[in-house]
Image (tube, rainbow, N blue to C red):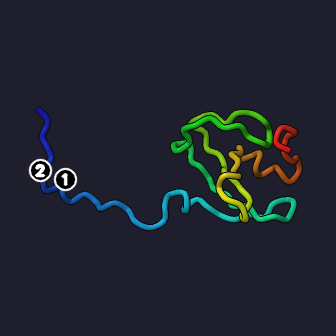
Amino acid sequence: MPRRNPRNARSRAEPPRTGPGLGDVYRRTESGPDGDEYVVRTVPGARAVKRYRCPGCDHEIMPGVAHVVAWPAGSGETDRRHWHGGCWNGRRTRGITRRWS
């Protein structure tokens, strides 16, 4: 039979973290090719749980794939778009697909 941990070891668990949320840790501001400012957030693969369509290549971003979320700095998060990391980095030379323009 496996040994159980004593109760006092469980009571010494760390308290929940306070302060900025996990999304704030990965958030930054970048200048776009049109000169506008964008708020950019990196989404790790472990936190990517839904399927999105990338405006850079018009392909799906599958669950579990790390990607970038970006939106204009002056607007709310309702204007955010999910991009593949490579598509976001290459947007200066390629632009967005017709579907989103």
Q: Indicate the quadrant containing the C terminus: top left, top right, bottom left or bottom right.
A: top right
Outermost residue, bottom direction?
19
* x and y, in percent, of residue 5 in the image: 15, 47
Q: Quadrant of residue 8?
A: bottom left
Distance from label 1 to label 2 (Cα)? 7 Å
Label 1 sits on a secondary structure element that is: helix
* x and y, in percent, of residue 68 in the image: 66, 50
Image marks 1 and 2: residues in contact by CB distance under 8 Å: yes
Mark 1 surroundings within 10 Å by alpha-carbon count, few (fewer than 14), some (14 through 19), many (20 or more): few
* x and y, in percent, of residue 78 in the image: 66, 52
**95 or 6: nearer the eye?**
95
Name the kind of residue labelled 1 in the image.
Answer: Arg
Would you name the residue on which mark 1 appears? Answer: 10
Would you name the residue on which mark 2 appears? Answer: 6
Label 2 sits on a secondary structure element that is: loop
Q: Indicate the quadrant containing the N terminus: top left, top right, bottom left or bottom right.
A: top left
Residue at point 88%, 46% (across, down): 94
Decide: is 22 above or below 65. Answer: below
Tag of residue 78: none
* x and y, in percent, of residue 16 in the image: 34, 60
Decide: is 51 above or below 28. Answer: above
**22 or 44: nearer the eye?**
22
Residue at point 65%, 55% (across, down): 77
Horizontally, residue 95 falls left or right of residue 23, namely right
Residue at point 65%, 64% (across, down): 28
Horizontally, residue 60 falls left or right of residue 8, namely right
Name the kind of residue labelled 2 in the image.
Answer: Pro
Mark 2 surroundings within 10 Å by alpha-carbon count, few (fewer than 14), some (14 through 19), many (20 or more): few
Number of labels in the image equals 2
